[in-house]
Image (cartoon, rainbow, N blue to C red):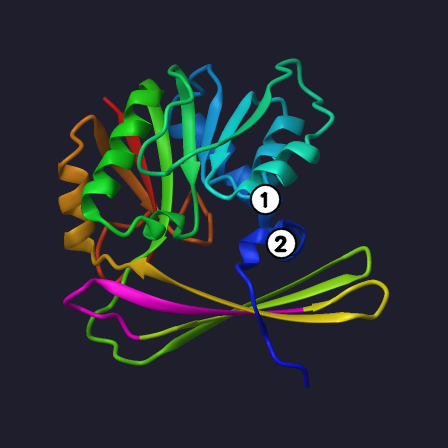
């Protein structure tokens, strides 16, 4: 068995796209339903902070939405641009830039913004998290909504956790394993060790390892951040099942949470 090579796997966007693309249609369905229900189908473009490979932007553009996104990783930005879709709708807008989650500006008048599945937790300082939410608020039209997904932390649980995804496309197989340590309660950090196992179409294999830290939140800590940005009103909470008919509360017993924040 070969050793893992140390490499930021976000620098390998093709593998990222392969392993996470399976859920794209379901997530796009959910976002369009959120826009219809909570923003009353407000007209205007859509914004994705930390858009990664642009998989959701591509799907939404094919459905006729005008989409803008940004990411902090240049390889991701280049991949998203190179794989721009043939846009089926009449909007003709698909734009991806390099940008910082904590401080960005791609314009105003957005009807919808979204950042799913814990990307928000890459922002390690609370002041920067507040700055991010204020930047989103500046971007949205009044009545526009932000779908923000993240995994809350149970500080009483001292066990390590593991999550795994697999994906395959055109003969490329990718398996991603995330090993997450118990949270450092004082520092509010959670260490993540990521292993990526790849089998390419020609039979060659790669084993990649990278690591990072997440900022941790329980429900009370997240509410405190939201209170610092009164321009955004929490109007609904769902979960990573992306079922709009299943409503939740922002509480510690619902760790996987998708917040719907509306611009006042």
Left or right of 219 in this view: 116: right
User: Image height check: is 100 above or below 205?
Assistant: above
For the residue labelled by badge 2, is the local secondary structure a helix, a strand or a loop?
loop
User: Image height check: is 15 above or below 24?
Assistant: below
For disc 2, the neighbor class at 10 Å (few under 14, some 14 to 19, many from 20) is some
Percent x, y for residue 151? 34, 57
User: Image height check: is 163 above or below 259?
Assistant: below
Q: Residue furthest bottom?
A: 1
Percent x, y for residue 63? 64, 27
Q: Point out the image quarter for the N terminus.
A: bottom right
Which residue occupies 63% across, 58% down? 19
Q: Identify the mark nearer the N-term, 2 or 1.
A: 2
Q: Residue furthest front?
A: 6
Tally of marks? 2
Query: Which residue is identified by label 2?
Result: 12
Residue situated in front as seen by the camera: 127 or 236: 127
Query: Which residue is identified by label 1?
Result: 75
Percent x, y for residue 133? 27, 34
Does the magenta run of residues contain 82?
no
- Distance CA(mark 2)–CA(mark 1): 7 Å
Q: Is residue 255 visible?
A: no
Percent x, y for residue 101? 36, 38
Q: Start and end of the magenta stretch? A: 182-197
Left or right of 230 in this view: 261: right
In which quadrant of the rendered view does residue 6 lie? bottom right
Q: Is residue 202 visible?
A: yes
Residue situated in front as seen by the camera: 64 or 83: 83
Q: Point out the image quarter for the C terminus.
A: top left
User: Image height check: is 144 above or below 256?
Assistant: above
For disc 1, the neighbor class at 10 Å (few under 14, some 14 to 19, many from 20) is some
């Amino acid at each position: 068995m070969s050793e893992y090579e140390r490499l930021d796997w976000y620098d390998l966007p093709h593998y990222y796209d392969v392993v996470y693309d399976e859920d794209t249609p379901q997530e796009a369905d959910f976002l369009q339903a959120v826009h219809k229900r909570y923003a009353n189908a407000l007209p205007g473009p859509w914004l994705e902070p930390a858009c990664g490979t642009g998989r959701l932007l591509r799907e939404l553009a094919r459905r006729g939405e005008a989409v803008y996104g940004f990411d902090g990783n240049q390889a991701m930005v280049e991949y998203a641009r190179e794989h721009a879709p043939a846009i089926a709708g009449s909007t003709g807008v698909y734009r991806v830039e390099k940008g910082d989650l904590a401080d960005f500006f791609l314009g105003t008048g957005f009807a919808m913004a979204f950042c799913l599945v814990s990307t928000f937790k890459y922002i390690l300082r609370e002041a920067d998290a507040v700055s991010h939410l204020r930047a989103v608020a500046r971007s949205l039209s009044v009545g526009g909504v932000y779908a923000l997904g993240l995994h809350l932390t149970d500080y009483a649980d001292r066990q390590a956790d593991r999550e795994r995804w697999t994906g395959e496309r055109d003969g490329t197989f990718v398996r991603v394993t995330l090993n997450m340590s118990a949270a450092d309660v004082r520092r509010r950090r959670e260490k993540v060790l990521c292993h990526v196992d790849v089998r390419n179409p020609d039979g060659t294999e790669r084993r990649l390892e990278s690591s990072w830290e997440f900022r941790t939140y329980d429900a009370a800590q997240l509410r405190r951040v939201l209170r610092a940005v009164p321009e955004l009103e929490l109007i609904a909470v769902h979960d990573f099942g992306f079922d709009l008919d299943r409503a939740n509360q922002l509480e510690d017993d619902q760790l996987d949470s998708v917040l719907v924040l509306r611009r006042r």
